[in-house]
Image: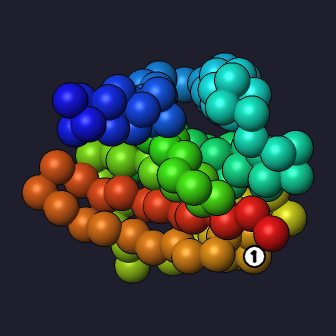
Amino acid sequence: MAAQLNTLLRAAYEHVCPIPPVPGAVSAVRRSAAAVLADWDVSASIADDALLVVSELVTNAIIHARPPAVLGLSWEGDAIRIEVTDAGPVIPACRSRDGIDPDEHGRGETIVHALATRHGIRVHPGGVTRWADLVAG
């Protein structure tokens, strides 16, 4: 019985959202994540940082990766885990950044690193998962 209850409670704090491969998807996914964080009663300061990380990771998946992509959110204790999994890079990782305006692109990773307590990338047979943990306090 305790194991069933634990599974139900855990499910209440996990959310998965597909990411359509279109530019307007970022705002829609961000709104969905905001509603979930509000339902979970996550503090405003952590929720604001989490939504910025969601925006950056989702944007990265839409611009630089092949579909399908999916956002995963989970909350355990005082930590929010944000994961975006995609089918891998569209272009080789060694591609030159010539012609890319640094004022419009390239800061997402820096923002994620600044806000996250822990972060990383997992490469697996299905693609790539970028993740970030944000811890309250």
Note whether 114 is above or below 54 in the view shown: below
At a point 45% along the width and 73% down the height, the residue shown is 120
At a point 74% along the width and 41% down the height, the residue shown is 42
Q: How many marks?
A: 1
Is residue 130 toward the left or the right of residue 111 in the image? Answer: left
Q: Is residue 137 visible?
A: yes
Quadrant of residue 95 within the rendered picture: bottom left
Q: Position of residue 104 (x, y in %)?
A: 80, 57
Give the quarter of the figure containing the N terminus. Answer: top left
Q: Which residue is mark 1?
A: 114
Looking at the picture, tell me which residue is in the foreground, 19 or 63. Answer: 19
Q: Position of residue 100 (x, y in %)?
A: 69, 64
Quadrant of residue 114 within the rendered picture: bottom right
Looking at the picture, tell me which residue is in the foreground, 81 or 29. Answer: 81
At a point 66% along the width and 31% down the height, the residue shown is 40
Q: Amino acid at mark 1?
A: Ala
Is residue 62 toward the left or the right of residue 46 in the image? Answer: left
Give the quarter of the figure containing the C terminus. Answer: bottom right
At a point 52% along the width and 52% down the height, the residue shown is 76
Q: Position of residue 119 (x, y in %)?
A: 52, 73
